[in-house]
Image (spheres, helix red, strand yellow):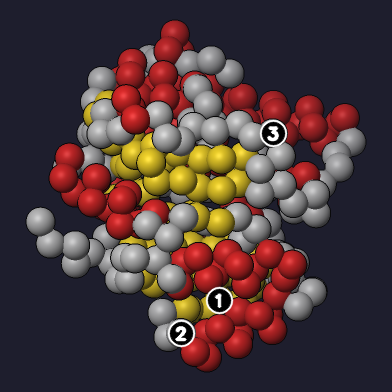
Amino acid sequence: MSLSQKISVIIPVYNSGQYLAKCLMTVLHQTYQNLEIIVVDDGSTDNSAEIYTLLAAKYPQIKIIRQKNFGVATARNTGLRAAQGSHVHFLDSDDLIELTYYEKMLTAALKANAELACSGFFFEKTGLSCGREKELSGKILATTADKMDLFNNKRGGVCWRYLYSFDLLKKHDLFFAEDMPRAEDTPFTIQAVYFANKIILVPEATYFYKHNPLSLSHISRTPEEETLIKNKEYLRILKFTSEHNIQNLITI
C-alpha cells in the first residue's frame, strides 16, 4: 500500500496567537509529510498573522487565506473550497495532534477502504479520553446503527476527530452551516458519518483538545443566544434524521 495521497489540513484562525505556533509545529513535524496546510485567518486582530507568516516563509506547504471575521463555519468552508488533497482534516488552531496522527489515520483508512477514520482524543480540561482503547483499534463500522452509535457517544459529533475522504464530501456536497457559527460541527458530522460507506476507529491516534477560554466555543452567551443556537442545531439534525428515517437511532 502506497501512502502517496495528499491530506489537506484546514486550520481556522481567530486570535489564537497564544497557541498557534505549537499547533502548526505539530502538523509540520508529522511523520506523514504529504500535507497541504490551509490556514484561514478569520479576521484576527492579535499576533496570529505574524506567527503564520513567519512559518509560511519557511514551510511552503502552508497556504494562507485571509478573510473578514465571519465565524469558524465560514472559515472551514473557505478552506474546503481551496483544498486539493484526497483527504481532509479540520484542526482547531488552539489544539494539538500527536506526531504520528496522519500516518496512523491515513494508513487505517486506506487499508480498510473507509471513507472516514475516527481518532481518539484527550480533553485537557477534564481528562476525558477516547484514546488508547486497544480493543477498538481497527474496528470497522458499516451499518447505519453502528455509525449512529458512534455519533451519539464520546464527542462523536465533533468534526476534528475524523479524517474525511474528500470524494465523500464532494459527492454529498457537505459544507458547514454558516448560519450556525458557534454550533457548526454536529449537523456537518452527522451527514458525513451517515453517508460514509465505512468508518474505521483509530483510537491510538490522539487529538489533544485544549481548553482555550477565549476561543469562540467558550465565549459567554446570553440565555437567549444559547437557546437560539441549540434550536438551530436541533432543527437541522431533526430535518436530516427525518429525511433519512433514522430518528430512532439518534440521541440529541
Q: Position of residue 228 (x, y in %)?
A: 76, 32
- At label 1, the amino acid type is Ile
Q: Position of residue 174 (x, y in %)?
A: 41, 46
With 252 as the anchor, is 211 left or right in this view? right
Instruction: Give the CA separation, mark 2 to mark 1.
Output: 15 Å
Q: Quadrant of the N terminus?
A: bottom left
Instruction: Give the CA separation, mark 3 to mark 2.
Output: 34 Å
- At label 3, the amino acid type is Thr
Q: Quadrant of the C terminus?
A: top right
Picture disc at residue 101: none
Q: Nearer the viewer, residue 64 or 211?
A: 211
Q: Mark 3 or mark 2: which comes first in sequence? A: 2
Instruction: Give the CA separation, mark 1 to mark 3.
Output: 33 Å
Picture disc at residue 126: 3
Picture disc at residue 59: 2
Q: Position of residue 152 (x, y in %)?
A: 49, 21
Q: Nearer the viewer, residue 102 or 192?
A: 102
- Asked which secondary structure carries label 1, the reply is strand
With 191 as the anchor, is 18 left or right in this view? right
Residue 238 visible in the displayed image: yes
Residue 239 visible in the displayed image: no
